[in-house]
Amino acid sequence: MEYPPLPTTAEVAAQFRTALHGAERADRPYRHWKLRDVFPRDLCTGILTLPIAPPLLGETDGTRASYNAARCFITPALRARFPTCEVLAAALQLPAVAAALAATLAVPVAGSFLRMEYIQDIDGAWLEPHRDIPEKLFSMVVYLFTGPDAANWGTDIYDAERRWVGRSAGTFDSAVIFVPGPDTWHGFEKRRINGVRRLMEINYVRPTWRDRDQLAAPESPIQVG
């Protein structure tokens, strides 16, 4: 018996579009959207049971770029190996999903490329306040961590002067989306991680994206339907 039983691409796409349609928009300290029940639970289980160990990084410098070689991007090779990765990538490549994202976020996604990173932070991981580069048309983080301390593992949010103003809830299978801009400061303050802080970062990136080995479908640009 295959475990977990995976939803179809159409089922994943339908639930994601429903979550996007019901997203709560907030405009402070910058515009962002909060989603609930982003993916079917069996897909979440499929992600959490991937046989991919968290990288043992020790103390880091507050940037992910400093350990690029240890990061886990959903590539064509992973899609071919793991059905969970294939179903998720195929759903987010669908023109109807792309059109829903374009309409909600008011970004021109046609011709962009899907980029997904499976992040598994352990104790010692942190992120300094930063802004995502404009080559990302949008940034979405889907929270997939659990445990008694997980309520404290959401993304830290800062204002234009990089002052801490709040923290996302980090509820399981919820997400936050924003369009990178000059004031979209966010990070992850140093704090104890008892367990593994699992999340999926998802972007559509511009055709000029240089790191083609990070793309889920480098030969298949996003089409809008």
Image (cartoon, rainbow, N blue to C red):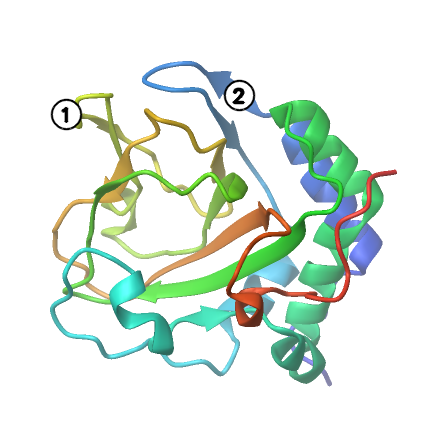
* Disc 2 crowd, CA 10 A, few/some/many (<14, 14-19, 20+): few
The answer to whether residue 13 is above or below residue 169 is below
- Between marks 1 and 2, how big is the CA–CA gap? 23 Å
> Which quarter of the figure has residue 95?
top right
Residue 64 horizontal/vertical position (percent): 29, 61
Please name the amino acid that badge 2 sits on.
Glu
Write down the residue under mark 2. Answer: 24
The answer to whether residue 139 is seen in the rendering is yes
The residue drawn where x is 12% and y is 51% is 190
Between marks 1 and 2 in the image, the one whose residue lies nearer the viewer:
1
The residue drawn where x is 73% and y is 85% is 1
| Residue 109 numbered mark, or none | none
Please, which residue is most extreme toward the top here? 27
Pointer 1 or 2: first along the chain? 2
Evaluate if marks 1 and 2 touch, with contact meaning CB atoms under 8 Å apart.
Answer: no
Please name the amino acid that badge 1 sits on.
Arg
Residue 177 horizontal/vertical position (percent): 50, 35
* Disc 1 crowd, CA 10 A, few/some/many (<14, 14-19, 20+): few
Residue 162 horizontal/vertical position (percent): 17, 28
